[in-house]
Image (spheres, helix red, strand yellow):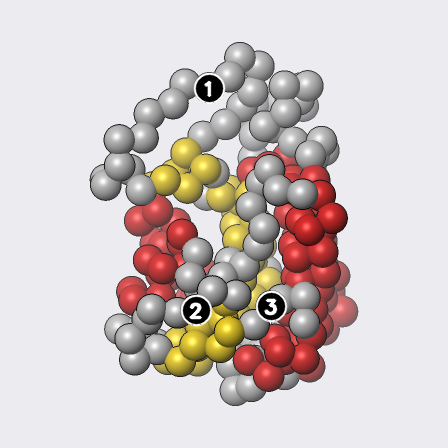
Amino acid sequence: MNILITGATGFIGRRLVPVLSKIHKIRAFGRSKSKFKEIEFIEGDLRDFNSIKKALKGIETVIHLGAVTAGKEALLTLDTDVKGTYNLVEASVQERVEKIIFASSIAAYGCLSKNFIPAYLPIDEKHPCIPEDIYGLSKFVGEEILKCYSRKDGVITISLRLSWVQDLKNSNYFSLPSKGTLWSTIDIEDVIKAIILCLEFKGSEVFNI
């Protein structure tokens, strides 16, 4: 299938593009210049509706990884992660994209805050989202944008609430949780497997990964 990957030069994108390009026709989109070989790359910004709309020509499925990561300036985060996601979804519907897979975050639950008190454990996809930081808020709103367009236009949308993504095989990563927070990590190889499974999934859904 013809797939557009936003944020293609980011941590996940750099690993995902070579894997999917062996099977599918990949078009990469990002703000940084690409080092991919034999992959179509469009340099652009999610905040620019026209540039993302052009990148969607002929695309069947979007894998939306592009975002400002946690801890960045609030207005930049909202402008990129919320407005950028809106631009992408609206343009996708206009270009008749069939499916959008969105890299959300467990931050949408609010569980990374020291003030967070879970309604129940373990936290599943039905747990209320009560984010207390801008990044978590931006991911929650992004999910709601996707759900809105699924209801309104019938586009298939899948939100993956990712844990803290790490390359556990090639790093010396080790961390202990802060007291009072709920958190987890996931290996990047498992994130890639989850995205591949979503390419074949037929419904609109939210998944903890």
Q: Quadrant of the N terminus?
A: bottom left
Identify the residue shown where x is 32% and y is 71%.
36
Disc 2 element: loop
Callout 3, which amino acid? Asp
Identify the residue shown where x is 42% and y is 61%.
9
Up/down of 146 relative to 173, above or below: below
Q: x and y percent of residue 150 in the render?
A: 68, 65
**How dense is the environment of label 2, judged by Cα within 10 Å: few (below 14), some, or many (20 and up)?**
few
Q: x and y percent of residue 53 in the render?
A: 63, 80
| Left-right relation of 130 to 57 | right
| Sequence-wise first label, 3 or 2 | 2
Residue identified by numbered label 3: 45
Disc 3 element: loop
Callout 2, which amino acid? Lys
Q: x and y percent of residue 119 in the render?
A: 67, 23
| Circle on res. 33 | 2
Instruction: Judge whether residue 96 can be spotted in this image.
Output: no
Residue identified by numbered label 1: 177
Q: CA distance from mark 3 to mark 2?
A: 12 Å
Identify the residue shown where x is 49% and y is 61%.
7
Up/down of 37 relative to 184, above or below: below
| Left-right relation of 172 to 81 | left
